Amino acid sequence: MNMVDLGDIRLHARVDGPEDGRPIVFANSLGTDLRLWDPILPLLPSGLRILRFDKRGHGLSDCPSAPYSMGQLVSDTERLMDHFGFRDAVFVGLSIGGMIAQGLAAKRLDLIRAVVLSNTGAKIGTRELWDSRIQGVKDHGIEGLADAVMERWFSKAFRSTPDLSLWRNMLTRQEDAGYVGCSAAISGTDFYTSTAALRLPALGIAGSEDGATPPDLVRETVDLIPGSKFALIRKAGHLPCVEQPEEYAQILSDFIRDTGHLESMS
């Protein structure tokens, strides 16, 4: 584990894999920390150098006062990649992480050779929806939203398993200010124009039972990028890397190989 001081914020990050491995970056969803990716990491090809991190207001990273902007989240990620020397990376972003991926690809294409937009959109929800959710957290804390969030995150079958408690606890133990701050960032973001201008290998991944970013939204977003691919994972909600890790890892591994990322090792 590393605590990286970026000047205005300290972020918790972790790098795994060989120093000379091919870079891949994972950005997780609202209300989760870098452990979101634990189920799939052992299933990925060898030879990858993997960067994961807790965005501002989440996990072990600093939690500034809300609100945050998407520009801040993109800048945090950009500086983190520069800090660790991650360039020409495959960038995998889920939900708000997928928005960060879109913003960073538009800003610093030298950092990203291919992008995976998982369970995300160029625009997610409406300002009214996010205002309501923010007010709910201010009034009742994240706990007050937790059950509704679990219904969006997971299929009915998964919600009947003991493992649900792992993810509910992860959500409710995040800082209220961090959840509110990142919710404000999502609320103010519309990447339709900039994402449509991207020209790089892109893969969209959706969960058939996703109540937060339905498959049609993910497909519509990734279709903005010419030549993109799309994969639907059935029996999964907003976090298919948790519910169907083998299938998720296989889809991701195939995309990594198809982009020639492993073969480009020097």
Image (cartoon, rainbow, N blue to C red):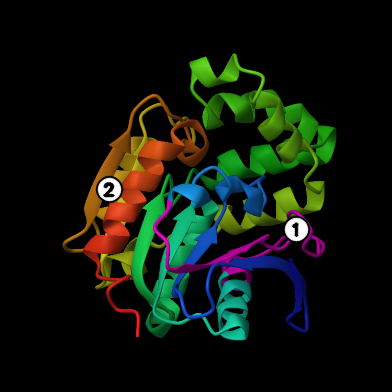
Q: x%, y% of residue 95? A: 50, 49
Three-letter amino acid code of the residue under disc 2: Glu
User: SS class of the residue under badge 1?
Assistant: loop
The residue that appears at 52% across and 57% down in the rendered structure is 97
Judging by the rendered image, the residue that carries numbered circle 1 is 57
Nearest the viewer among 197 and 206 is 206
Q: Is residue 137 magenta?
A: no
Q: Is residue 63 magenta?
A: yes
Quadrant in the rendering for residue 184: bottom right
Q: Which residues are magenta?
A: 44-73
Quadrant position of the N terminus in the picture? bottom right
Three-letter amino acid code of the residue under disc 1: Gly
Q: x%, y% of residue 251? A: 31, 47
The residue that appears at 21% across and 58% down in the rendered structure is 228
* Dot in front, 2 or 1: 1
The residue that appears at 47% across and 30% down in the rendered structure is 211
Q: CA distance from mark 2 to mark 1?
A: 29 Å
Q: Is residue 240 above or below residue 49?
A: above
Nearest the viewer among 77 and 184 is 77
Does 144 sit left or right of 84 as displayed?
right
Earlier in the chain: of badge 2 and badge 1, it is 1
Q: Is residue 203 above or below residue 241?
A: below
Judging by the rendered image, the residue that carries numbered circle 2 is 220
